Image: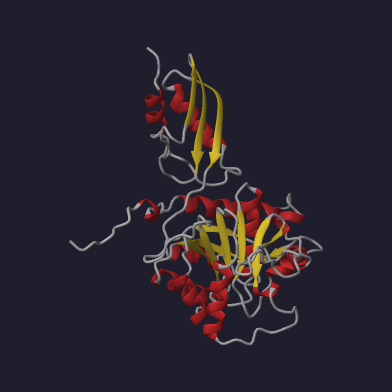
Amino acid sequence: MSVTAEQILGALSQVTDPNTKKKLAVTAKDCEIKLNGRDVDITVPVGYPLHNGEPELRKRIETALDALGLAVKSLRLDTRIASHAVQPGLKPMPNIRNIVAVASGKGGVGKSTTAVNLALGLSVQGARVGLLDADIYGPSVPIMLGLSGKPKSLDGKSMEPLVGHGLQANSIGFLIDQDAPAIWRGPMVTQALVQLLNQTNWNDLDYLIVDMPPGTGDIALTLAQKVPLTGAIIVTTPQDLALADARKGLRMFEKVNVPVLGIVENMSVHICTNCGHAEPIFGEHGGRNMAAEFNLPWLGALPLQLSIRERTDSGHPTVISEPNSQAAQTYLDIARRIAVNVASLPRDTAAKMPTVVARKV
């Protein structure tokens, strides 16, 4: 008795993805199946860049099809990143599938360095990624990506993003002189950021990473309310003072119904450049404990390491300049966990809802 495509889809739909911990969402439309006797060539869609999360998923798929008496001749896992739900009253931007905010309760915790390296981590794993520098008073993305010059406008109304290391990027730092301060009041800053987001011609992005301004003031809160966010990441150090402010940032996103995708602990330990000795000068496990306290994903810890600072200041962040280093691998692992957590969120259904038009009768 021959096996049908429907039976194959049924078997695949019972496979639990070890990364998302959910059943595979496969349909006849997005899953390509070619049968030749007992041999099968198959393409299965996944909603995140694969990186190192592929072997166990392959094994589970092959086991499920083996139960049907089939031998997998070729198996292709196809990354197809979907748009996911955003805050009530907002809808995803048509050219950006997911916007993820990288935030901290205070400055000085390495939020921008983390945001840039995580954006690059998603990009090198195959995603289309943009980076929006939302820190108007202290824009650092131009330096970190080694970019200069002003964005071009082809129509006099919108801007083309600059591209650095494969990332589409925009920042107020591209629009004002390098040494000029942004002496603006809150409403002007908020308006400028919304314009940077909406008037940049982002080109078919899977993820737009937003490097948020530090703190939980009016600017950060307004951004969290007006920008259609899929989720947010909290960056902190293990220090008690930083953790106290990080909790405030977390609560801000909770109040505006933005899912927090996890906690990143930066400057977890100091790595001595002479002997390699690791010392937790800011304390230990603060970020991990905070994640457990709020029942949130623990994304990982990054060291206070001289080379990370040097590479970022030179415009060649760690993920690009030292791809085989332990720090780069940590950034890649955290980026993958973020993508997996995004894929686990509810899909956006606004585009599928029919338009209701009221008419007088």
Residue shown at the point (50%, 27%) measured from the top left: 62
**Looking at the rendering, which quadrant does residue 184 occupy?**
bottom right
Residue shown at the point (72%, 66%) measured from the top left: 144
Above or below, 42 relative to 323? above
In-image side of 359 versus 316 (left or right): left
Above or below, 164 relative to 66? below
**Looking at the rendering, which quadrant does residue 301 occupy?**
bottom right
Residue shown at the point (64%, 54%) measured from the top left: 121
The colour scheme used to paint the residues is: secondary structure
In-image side of 321 versus 290 (left or right): right
Above or below, 237 relative to 25? below
* Extreme-left residue of the structure: 361
Q: Position of residue 36 (x, y in %)?
A: 50, 16
Q: Position of residue 289 (x, y in %)?
A: 49, 65
Q: Nearer the viewer, residue 310 or 291?
A: 310
Dividing the image into 4 quarters, which one contains the N terminus? top left
Q: Nearer the viewer, residue 116 or 157?
A: 157
Dividing the image into 4 quarters, which one contains the C terminus? bottom left
* Extreme-front residue of the structure: 361
**Looking at the rendering, which quadrant does residue 207 occupy?**
bottom right
Q: Position of residue 53 (x, y in %)?
A: 56, 42
Q: In this rendering, does residue 175 appear at all? A: yes
Q: Position of residue 225 (x, y in %)?
A: 44, 72
* Extreme-top residue of the structure: 1
Q: In this rendering, does residue 214 appear at all? A: no
Tag count in the figure?
A: 0
